[in-house]
Image (cartoon, grey):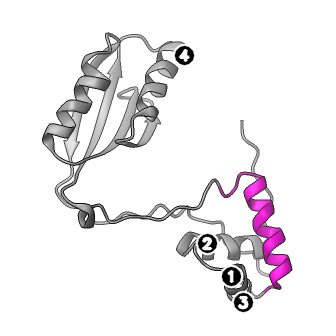
Amino acid sequence: MIKAINLDDTDLRLLDLLQRDASLSNQALSVAAHTSAATCLRRVKRLVDTGVIERRVALLAPQRLGPALTAIVEVGLDRQGAEHLEAFEARAVAEPAVQQCYRVSSGPDLVLVLQVPDMPGYHALVQRLFTQDANVRNVKTFFSVHRAKFDPAVPLPAARRV
């Protein structure tokens, strides 16, 4: 089990600001967080070193890059032993089209979120990932027709009042 990190109000302010815009310079971040640049730099480094901040990325608008198809896929496996789940999961996360991969309970074994250029791209992925795996029992795919919200921000605990 992963241990939670103790976060104070300054940490929470920094995390909130970085979730909104990770491109802020340390100087701009320190001003927005109402702290010194040195404190800001030290705090962000600690948040990275402890794994609270996994990575900083640019969020792209898929529709601006050309045709895109988002699919949410439920995958059921014949054998659910740890080694079988880990083997399929390793293949899934190695696939560039797989944006998210979750093991779930009370239903399918895994849920994947895919981003493919089009239906032929989806069919090619089906062949690589599902059809050629003898342990895949069933696949149920939902295609997105409209994205109403996409926000990777993690809800933060409320700041403590002093």
Q: Quote the CA–CA distance across marks 4 and 1.
A: 43 Å
Q: Please tell me how crowded label 4 is: few (under 14), some (14-19), or many (20+) other residues with Cα within 10 Å.
A: few
The residue drawn where x is 73% and y is 58% is 48
Tags 1 and 3 touching, CB below 8 Å:
yes
Q: Is residue 154 magenta?
A: no
> How many numbered dots are placed on residues in this image?
4
Tags 1 and 2 touching, CB below 8 Å:
yes
Q: Quote the CA–CA distance across marks 1 and 2.
A: 8 Å
Disc sitting over residue 82 in the figure:
4
Q: Quote the CA–CA distance across marks 1 and 3.
A: 5 Å
Q: Is residue 162 visible?
A: no
Q: Provide the residue designation for mark 2.
A: 18
Magenta residues, as a range?
35-53
- The answer to whether residue 103 is left or right of residue 26 is left
Tags 4 and 3 touching, CB below 8 Å:
no
Disc sitting over residue 29 in the figure:
1
Residue flagged by tag 2: what amino acid is it?
Leu
The front one of 102 and 128 is 128
Q: Secondary structure at mark 3?
A: helix
Q: Quadrant of residue 27?
A: bottom right
Earlier residue among tags 4 and 3? 3
